[in-house]
Amino acid sequence: MANVVIVGAQWGDEGKGKVVDLYTEFADVVVRYGGGANAGHTLVVDGRKLVTHLVPSGILHGRGKKCVLGDGMVIDPKVLLSEIAELKGQGLLADDRDLLVGERAHVIFPYHREIDALRERGKGALGTTKRGIGPAYEAKMARRGIRIADLTRPARLAELIAQNLDEVGPLIAHLGGRVLDESDALALVDEYLGYGAALARYRGDASRAIHDEIKRGRHVLFEGAQGTLLDVDHGTYPFVTSSSTLAGGACTGAGIGPTLITAVIGITKCYSTRVGGGPFPTELHDELGERLRETGAEYGATTGRPRRCGWLDVAALRLAVRLSGISGLALTKLDVLRGLKKIKVCVGYQVGGAPIRDELPLDLEDLAHATPIYEELDGWEGDAREVRDFDDLPVAARKYVRRVEDLCGVSASLISVGPGRAETIVLRNPFR
């Protein structure tokens, strides 16, 4: 039995979709435990590109791989049903029993998206995806959230929607939006009861189902969303997401005990990217940054927004290793660095006259005055996309990987040398 958590070790977009897809070959169950449709996993299998937002990317492996949307998620049912229809149109999800939607997961409503979009027009815009994620989590924490199970109970749903509209009406008006009235409330009840009926075949007790699978000795893969530095507690607050993106979030979001986790794989690109606002000390604002963006196809899977690109921040990676107890690294997009004469790696920070910090400072004021300290390594030529053995990589590429391992104190388990499923060097398998 192996229960493996996959987490992003940067600001998200590290290539979790491909890594989860690879490891799903060895897993029986794949669980998404947090976030919502703000996440996007791009997968390329046999030349076919597929982007998933809510359904775990393990769904590509077909019948017999159970995929679970955990109770820690916030789910837009319209988006989910559209995604299910697309998957079925591609010949996937042939057996409805392969998908389980946690009945205690919270639901995103149009007024959550409205609040999100209105806030992004204002002075304090954070660069969100405007999918309503933050406002839905706010409702959850305020104990007025609406859950998947509520979509099958007409009286309860009507009461909860009315309560929520009373709460958010003044806020929407303050932000300059149109306040929903009683007729809107009735329409929402009808619409979301319809979603509840359509999702009824997938709904269930996710926590109990996951626990039962583990007790049976089945292999479980926990799929994280976003990345460590976007964690609501431990990231670059307030430029973060609204949920826990760490390995510990798998326990709370999926409803299992931490003693059941057997390994944590942290995914990091061989350079850094970030989408939206917020600090990014190693960002490149020159032709090199543009080269990384174009070569690495760095555009958001969910929004299409161009990602900001920069050098690998090992000081941030050390923070991710510590916060999630990462036991193995999955290094992605090594191929993108091909052709560079020199490659820089941030190994620490100088903040004013204080001693050098070996981790990324998280306070926004400290970050504003932080100077990255770089180590320079040799680049390499040669296309590595056909390489499947570490020893066959160019010498400088091997040295780069080994230096990253030494600097963060964790060995690589996997190296991605291209976007395709087969374009991977597997060094260790956490399921074996």
Image (spheres, helix red, strand yellow):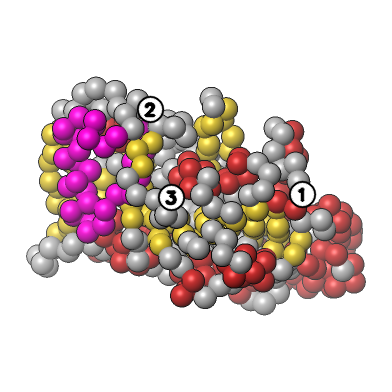
**Of the residues shown, which amino acid type is indicated by label 1?**
Asp
Q: Is residue 115 visible?
A: no
The residue lying at 70 percent from left, 51 percent from top is: 98
**Label located before the other in sequence (2 or 1):** 1
Q: Is residue 13 above or below residue 232?
A: above
| Mark with earlier residue (1, 3) | 3
Disc 2 versus disc 3: distance between alpha carbons?
18 Å
Residue located beneath label 3 in the image: 12
Q: Tell me how far mark 1 sits from mark 3, CA to CA.
A: 30 Å
Q: Mark 2 Cα within 10 Å, few/some/many (few <14, many 20+)? A: some
Q: Position of residue 308 (x, y in %)?
A: 37, 40
Tell me the residue that label 1 is attached to.
96
Q: Amino acid at mark 2?
A: Glu
Q: Are marks 1 and 3 in contact (CB under 8 Å)?
A: no
| Dot 1 alpha-carbon crowd within 10 angstroms: few under 14, some 14 to 19, many 20 or more | some
Residue that appears at 85% across and 73% down: 156
Element on which disc 3 rests: loop
Q: Is residue 304 left or right of residue 336?
A: right
Find out whether residue 391 is within the magenta segment: yes
Task: Indicate which disc residue 294 carries.
Answer: 2
Please name whichever residue, 347 or 90, is drawn nearer the observer in this view of the structure: 90
Q: Report the number of numbered marks.
A: 3
Q: First in sequence, mark 2 or 3: give its number.
A: 3
The residue segment tinted magenta is 389-418
